Amino acid sequence: MASLAAFTRREADPQGKLFKMKTEMACKNDGSRYKEPPGRAKGHRVIATSTIMGNYEVIVCTITSKDQVPGIEFLPITPTVGSASYWQFPLQLRQSIDQYEATDLRPPSYLRLEPFKVPFEMLLPHTSSLGGHLSLSCSSIRSLCDKMGALGLIKPFYPEWEEKRKELEKQQKMEAEQVNLQYRNVQASMEKAKLERQSADPEAYRKMCEDQGMQWEDWADAMEEHGGFDCYYDFW
């Protein structure tokens, strides 16, 4: 198995790139690990939807000409044979940062959003006629990741994230309960002190309340003399 250090920087970040999957025989011949693709995915070209994960595996989705399977989402890919247009939303292929061209993908072509994992060494770069490794544009990669995230397709591949999320939610709940308890204790202490002052000297307590009321009225009168209350609200 090839080590990560043996890959170039570009190879070490396969996300969004187009690949061909090696056959089981090809993997045996060159000593690569082989993992049986699910269903009828064998023989299809794929796009990597993740960076290299643990055990040097990547998440991939197959490219297909069909887009009608119940319960599965499909995203159209462009350009294809006979089409140099690359403005079709959402997935656009490019062979370099600033150069687009028609590919050998047969129209119509779709990315089947039914991800699975394969060893990275089982993938062969799919290049254009100019020799560049075909890849999705940056905006297409973002759109693809957002779509898969919204559909909950990424979560199963990162169980540790789910564990961390649950642990964080549990911690936040405990902290919120602690803050709420402290607030209730402070409120109870203030109410207790108020009742103690009231029972210790009812007359003094009544006078204190009257003084506080008079102070509020004096302040309100002063504000009225100076033009009333100026309120500014900043919603931004």
Image (cartoon, grey):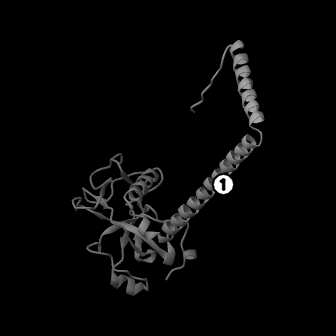
In the image, residue 5 lies at what x, y percent?
58, 75
Pick the front one: 176 or 42: 176
Q: In the figure, is residue 179 to the left or right of 27?
A: right
> Taking the image as drawn, is residue 211 in sight?
yes
Residue at the disc numbered 1: 182
In the image, residue 163 lies at what x, y percent?
51, 69
The 10 Å Cα crowd at callout 1, few under 14, some 14 to 19, many 20 or more, is: few
> Taking the image as drawn, is residue 104 in sight?
no
Q: Residue at x 59, y 61 (%)?
A: 174
Count of marks overlaid on the render: 1
Q: Is mark 1 on a helix, strand or loop?
A: helix
Q: In the figure, is residue 199 to the left or right of 16?
A: right
Q: In the figure, is residue 77 to the left or right of 165?
A: left
In the image, residue 60 lies at what x, y percent?
39, 68
Q: Which amino acid does label 1 sit on?
A: Gln
Q: Residue at x 63, y 58 (%)?
A: 178
Above or below residue 103? Residue 6 is below
Q: Which residue is drawn at 77% across and 43% down?
A: 200
Pick the front one: 231 or 127: 231
Displayed quadrant of residue 109: bottom left
